[in-house]
Protein backbone atom coordinates (compact mmCIF):
# COMPACT_ATOMS: atom_id res chain seq x y z
CA UNK A 1 0.00 0.00 0.00
CA UNK A 2 2.86 2.37 0.78
CA UNK A 3 4.52 1.74 -2.59
CA UNK A 4 1.24 2.58 -4.29
CA UNK A 5 1.13 5.90 -2.45
CA UNK A 6 -2.00 5.23 -0.44
CA UNK A 7 -2.35 7.92 2.24
CA UNK A 8 -3.86 5.48 4.72
CA UNK A 9 -0.68 3.35 4.63
CA UNK A 10 1.49 6.37 5.40
CA UNK A 11 -0.89 7.42 8.20
CA UNK A 12 -0.59 3.99 9.78
CA UNK A 13 3.20 4.03 9.52
CA UNK A 14 3.35 7.58 10.89
CA UNK A 15 1.17 6.77 13.91
CA UNK A 16 3.08 3.57 14.60
CA UNK A 17 6.69 4.74 14.19
CA UNK A 18 6.73 8.48 14.86
CA UNK A 19 6.70 8.14 18.68
CA UNK A 20 9.50 5.58 18.57
CA UNK A 21 11.59 7.65 16.18
CA UNK A 22 10.99 10.80 18.20
CA UNK A 23 11.97 9.09 21.46
CA UNK A 24 15.15 7.64 19.96
CA UNK A 25 16.13 11.01 18.48
CA UNK A 26 15.35 12.83 21.73
CA UNK A 27 17.46 10.39 23.75
CA UNK A 28 20.43 11.04 21.46
CA UNK A 29 19.99 14.77 20.89
CA UNK A 30 18.34 15.93 24.11
CA UNK A 31 16.45 18.59 22.20
CA UNK A 32 12.71 18.51 21.55
CA UNK A 33 12.86 20.55 18.34
CA UNK A 34 15.70 18.53 16.80
CA UNK A 35 14.06 15.24 17.78
CA UNK A 36 10.77 16.29 16.17
CA UNK A 37 12.54 17.45 13.05
CA UNK A 38 14.56 14.24 12.76
CA UNK A 39 11.56 11.96 13.20
CA UNK A 40 9.55 13.93 10.65
CA UNK A 41 12.42 14.04 8.15
CA UNK A 42 12.84 10.27 8.37
CA UNK A 43 9.15 9.71 7.65
CA UNK A 44 9.19 12.23 4.79
CA UNK A 45 12.25 10.49 3.36
CA UNK A 46 10.43 7.16 3.63
CA UNK A 47 7.48 8.59 1.72
CA UNK A 48 9.72 10.10 -0.94
CA UNK A 49 11.56 6.80 -1.47
CA UNK A 50 8.47 4.59 -1.15
CA UNK A 51 8.68 3.32 -4.71
CA UNK A 52 12.34 2.30 -4.35
CA UNK A 53 11.88 0.40 -1.09
CA UNK A 54 12.09 -3.34 -1.42
CA UNK A 55 10.53 -5.45 1.28
CA UNK A 56 8.62 -3.72 4.06
CA UNK A 57 9.10 -6.61 6.46
CA UNK A 58 11.99 -4.78 8.15
CA UNK A 59 10.50 -1.31 7.97
CA UNK A 60 11.43 -0.58 11.58
CA UNK A 61 15.10 -1.33 10.92
CA UNK A 62 15.02 0.74 7.75
CA UNK A 63 13.49 3.73 9.56
CA UNK A 64 15.96 3.58 12.44
CA UNK A 65 18.83 3.32 9.98
CA UNK A 66 17.54 6.46 8.25
CA UNK A 67 17.29 8.16 11.66
CA UNK A 68 20.83 7.17 12.61
CA UNK A 69 22.16 8.48 9.30
CA UNK A 70 20.29 11.79 9.73
CA UNK A 71 21.74 12.20 13.23
CA UNK A 72 25.25 11.46 11.98
CA UNK A 73 24.75 14.10 9.29
CA UNK A 74 23.54 16.57 11.93
CA UNK A 75 26.55 15.90 14.16
CA UNK A 76 28.88 16.41 11.21
CA UNK A 77 27.18 19.69 10.29
CA UNK A 78 27.39 20.93 13.87
CA UNK A 79 31.04 19.91 14.13
CA UNK A 80 31.86 21.76 10.90
CA UNK A 81 29.98 24.81 12.14
CA UNK A 82 31.81 24.71 15.48
CA UNK A 83 35.16 24.42 13.69
CA UNK A 84 34.29 27.32 11.40
CA UNK A 85 33.10 29.43 14.33
CA UNK A 86 36.30 28.67 16.24
CA UNK A 87 38.47 29.56 13.25
CA UNK A 88 36.51 32.77 12.71
CA UNK A 89 36.88 33.79 16.37
CA UNK A 90 40.60 33.05 16.23
CA UNK A 91 41.02 35.14 13.09
CA UNK A 92 38.99 37.98 14.57
CA UNK A 93 41.09 38.00 17.71
CA UNK A 94 44.29 37.96 15.66
CA UNK A 95 43.20 40.46 13.04
CA UNK A 96 41.63 43.34 14.93
CA UNK A 97 41.40 46.38 12.69
CA UNK A 98 44.10 48.95 13.51
CA UNK A 99 41.53 51.75 13.72
CA UNK A 100 39.57 49.80 16.34
CA UNK A 101 42.74 49.09 18.34
CA UNK A 102 43.78 52.72 18.16
CA UNK A 103 40.38 53.87 19.37
CA UNK A 104 40.37 51.37 22.24
CA UNK A 105 43.92 52.36 23.22
CA UNK A 106 43.06 56.04 23.13
CA UNK A 107 39.94 55.53 25.25
CA UNK A 108 41.84 53.38 27.74
CA UNK A 109 44.59 56.01 28.01
CA UNK A 110 41.95 58.68 28.68
CA UNK A 111 40.29 56.52 31.34
CA UNK A 112 43.65 55.88 33.01
CA UNK A 113 44.55 59.58 32.99
CA UNK A 114 41.16 60.53 34.46
CA UNK A 115 41.55 57.93 37.18
CA UNK A 116 45.04 59.14 38.04
CA UNK A 117 43.88 62.77 38.12
CA UNK A 118 41.12 61.87 40.61
CA UNK A 119 43.59 60.32 43.06
CA UNK A 120 44.44 62.26 46.22
CA UNK A 121 47.32 64.66 45.58
CA UNK A 122 50.11 62.77 47.40
CA UNK A 123 48.98 59.47 45.96
CA UNK A 124 48.90 60.97 42.45
CA UNK A 125 52.36 62.54 42.81
CA UNK A 126 53.86 59.31 44.19
CA UNK A 127 52.33 57.28 41.39
CA UNK A 128 53.53 59.66 38.67
CA UNK A 129 57.05 59.69 40.10
CA UNK A 130 57.04 55.91 40.17
CA UNK A 131 55.57 55.27 36.73
CA UNK A 132 56.43 58.33 34.67
CA UNK A 133 59.85 59.18 36.07
CA UNK A 134 60.78 55.59 36.98
CA UNK A 135 61.97 56.49 40.47
CA UNK A 136 62.40 53.76 43.01
CA UNK A 137 60.25 53.69 46.12
CA UNK A 138 63.25 54.76 48.20
CA UNK A 139 63.98 57.72 45.89
CA UNK A 140 60.33 58.82 46.05
CA UNK A 141 60.33 58.48 49.83
CA UNK A 142 63.48 60.61 50.10
CA UNK A 143 62.22 63.22 47.66
CA UNK A 144 58.80 63.59 49.33
CA UNK A 145 59.98 63.04 52.90
CA UNK A 146 57.79 59.92 53.32
CA UNK A 147 58.47 56.42 54.52
CA UNK A 148 58.98 53.68 51.93
CA UNK A 149 55.90 51.84 53.25
CA UNK A 150 53.78 54.98 52.73
CA UNK A 151 55.05 55.21 49.15
CA UNK A 152 54.19 51.55 48.61
CA UNK A 153 50.69 52.10 50.02
CA UNK A 154 50.10 55.07 47.69
CA UNK A 155 51.24 53.05 44.68
CA UNK A 156 49.09 50.07 45.72
CA UNK A 157 46.07 52.37 46.10
CA UNK A 158 46.62 53.90 42.65
CA UNK A 159 47.07 50.49 41.03
CA UNK A 160 43.89 49.23 42.68
CA UNK A 161 41.92 52.14 41.21
CA UNK A 162 43.45 51.53 37.78
CA UNK A 163 42.61 47.82 37.93
CA UNK A 164 38.99 48.73 38.69
CA UNK A 165 38.86 50.91 35.57
CA UNK A 166 40.33 48.15 33.39
CA UNK A 167 37.95 45.53 34.84
CA UNK A 168 34.96 47.76 34.11
CA UNK A 169 36.02 47.97 30.45
CA UNK A 170 36.27 44.16 30.13
Image (spheres, rainbow, N blue to C red):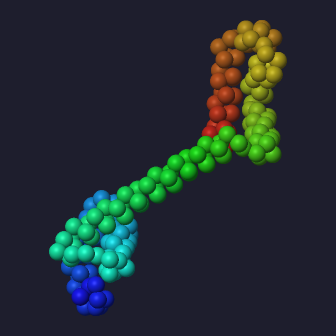
Quadrant in the rendering for residue 108: top right
For the residue pair 94 and 60, the one nearer the viewer reads as 60
At 22% from the left edge and 67% from the top edge, which residue is drawn? 61
Quadrant in the rendering for residue 112: top right
Q: Total number of numbered labels?
A: 0
At 66% from the left edge and 17% from the top edge, which residue is drawn? 152
Horizontally, residue 156 falls left or right of residue 83, namely: right
Quarter of the image that includes the N terminus? bottom left
Tell me if I can see residue 47 in this picture: yes
Residue 164 lies, in percent from the top left, at 64, 37
The outermost residue toward the left is: 57
Quadrant in the rendering for residue 107: top right
For the residue pair 56 and 40, the one nearer the viewer reads as 56
At 75% from the left edge and 30% from the top edge, which residue is drawn? 120
For the residue pair 130 and 12, the one nearer the viewer reads as 12
Residue 136 lies, in percent from the top left, at 74, 11
Residue 162 lies, in percent from the top left, at 68, 33
For the residue pair 100 and 90, the one nearer the viewer reads as 90
Q: Is residue 169 above or below residue 26?
A: above
Tell me if I can see residue 104 in this picture: no
Quarter of the image that includes the C terminus? top right
Residue 71 lies, in percent from the top left, at 36, 61
Horizontally, residue 21 falls left or right of residue 125, namely: left
Q: Is residue 49 above or below residue 120?
A: below
At 31% from the left edge and 67% from the top edge, which residue is drawn? 66
Q: Is residue 132 above or below residue 170?
A: above
Amino acid sequence: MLKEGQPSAFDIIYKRYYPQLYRAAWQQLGCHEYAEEMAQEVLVQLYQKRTAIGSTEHLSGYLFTLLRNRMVDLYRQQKRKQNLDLKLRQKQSIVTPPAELALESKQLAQDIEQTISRLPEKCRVVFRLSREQNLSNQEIADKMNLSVSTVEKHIAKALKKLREVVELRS
